[in-house]
Amino acid sequence: MTRNTVRLTMAQALVRYLCNQFTEIEGERVPLFAGVFGIFGHGNVTCLSEALEQVQDQLPTWRGQNEQTMALAAIGFAKAKRRRQIMVAATSIGPGALNMVTAAGVAMANRLPVLLIAGDTFANRLPDPVLQQVEHFNDPSITANDAFKPVVRYWDRIVVPEQILQSLPQAVATMLDPADCGPAFIGLAQDTQELAYDYPEVFFEPKVWKIPRPRPDREAVAAAAELLKTAKRPLIISGGGVRYSLAGETLAKFAAERGIPVVETIAGKGTLTHDDAVHAGPIGIVGSTSANALAKEADVILAIGTRLQDFTTGSWTAFSRDAQFISVNAARFDAVKHRSLAVVGDALETIGELDAALGGWKADAALLKHAKTLFAEWNKLLDDVQAPTNDPVPSYAQVVAVLNKVAGPNDTLISAAGGTPGEVVKGWRVKNPDTFDCEFGFSCMGYEIPAGWGCAMAQEGPGGTGGTPIVMLGDGTYMMANSDVYSAALTGHKMVVVVCDNGGFAVINRLQQAKGVPGFNNLLTDCRVQNRENPLHVDFVKHAEAMGAKAVKAESLADLERVMKEALAHDGITVVNIVSDAWKWVPGDADWDVGVPETSNFETVRAARKAQEKIREAQRLGV
């Protein structure tokens, strides 16, 4: 048999392979790789860009402004698509590649797929040291791209053209594996990109990838069912894995029929609507009093699709020491944490099999009624703190309430770091499933605006909600990464960015002072600045206008409502600026373990240390 081949450069072959990978979303075949975010430099402009230019209509390339933020946009896209479609982020070598390492950490922590491609040094080493090369005197094989190894699920360096025949399928399989999902990195040696090779044509045959649904072990399901039957006060914790498994409706039905209240992690928020019959609020440090009360009372916790991060568990102070955990997770690593009864499998499949194994068992009918009573009390608390007042400067909670009021049912709220996560996780009342994105696995300042750009792209195709991304962030985060305001204006993508100006890094100032340290280097008034009484403030309206956005400053809550309605009606990007209070926050009732100095000259720090020791005494011990 004669093997048919086609002669292509390695870069051309890579791009052709990407163009021929497909998936299905809601029954429609779509490209697996929806596009490329790219910044070209000498490490990729002569070869990779040559290949991408020829497929613009099939695999569109979007020019980023910063390597980190374009990769964050790819992550926001993947999250909005619930890991069903993937974007590529391509950069040159050296500093451009290293700029993407932070974004790789975001994708790694959040179990989200993105394909990161960077140029690399010369495989033949003849011109070494080349421009932007870092040299290790005892290991010439190390390049800047080795920095990706701790923060990706798959890593490879292509030094001969035929290596992509094995590497690319493995990278794709990793990104689509429910248990191993995360970023994949491929480094392309500069001189290898240019080399032609006779690739087998079968390598480029169109392939439709199916995301697997691994079924759990029967004995594990049976054991989980028997343990759950012993529960007097069971509780379900719904994590991000439920969303990515598309198991929201199944979970809601299961919980309603079994009479078990459901609380949500940060990543899981938005799986259920706020008013769902079984929903009892977000759990943990930025959670609700209702969910945290149920956690304290629970004797068996069914944790589905969550890695039980410290913000979920209150650093393991949120539960009774005698409570038992059943952990359903596609990843064995997550399922076995903290002495859980591990059920390794897809959330959708496992819920169905667990339901069948439970037979006619149901929780006491009083439990769900109790949960809804607690949740009603939480809603009353929210109503009180979100209500308008005569204060000239509104709180975050009041701003959240206005945004929530004017948002359409399919509009997506996006936040990440600083003061907004706690306020939106607590205070945002989800109207439709999958319209909430708070990146708190890595808590990456700067995620918000690029994620809004990626989300706007994701809403356009199959599986998108069709709504508008509403990005909420603080002034400190805006200053870290705002260039994709220009990106969205340049490409014509619609989003609304709400900048709450509270004069610096307000939420970390809150933690600093709560642990006894005087305010220092966080608020502008505590920094080494020319005028502490009246520090220089950025004119965010002028700044955003300079990048092509429609921009406006809201002078009050009433004005904010008017401005937001206009912004949501505007067919483009709008930046809304409002001054907000740096000291008012929605109250919380969960503990968090952070380092507090064991010795200090400050009496306030010494007192905080004693309080921290009490928190640690309450921790549930586990491994």
Image (tube, rainbow, N blue to C red):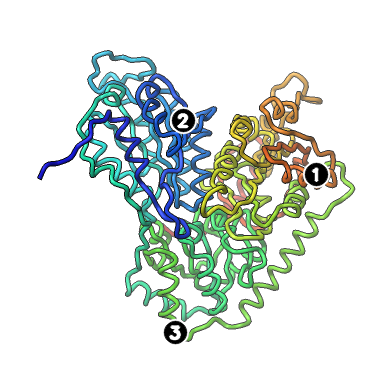
Q: Which of 308 and 245 is in front in this view?
A: 245
Quarter of the rendering occupied by the N terminus: top left
Q: Where is residue 381 in the image (x, y as percent from the top left)?
A: 76, 61
Residue 427: quadrant of the picture: bottom right
Q: Of the residues shown, which amino acid type is indicated by label 1?
A: Leu
Mark 1 surroundings: few (<14), some (14-19) or many (≥20) residues within 10 A: many
Mark 1 or mark 2: name the one nearer the start of the chain.
Answer: 2
The numbered dot on residue 38 is 2
Q: Nearer the viewer, residue 312 or 108?
A: 108
Secondary structure of the residue carrying tag 3 is loop
Could you say where residue 623 lies in the image, as x and y percent from the top left? 41, 57
Please, what secondary structure does the residue beneath circle 1 have? helix
State the separation of the CA atoms marked 3 and 1: 52 Å
Instruction: Kindly identify which numbered label has been placed on residue 359.
Output: 3
Label 1 belongs to which residue? 560
Q: Where is residue 63 in the image (x, y as percent from the top left)?
A: 51, 29
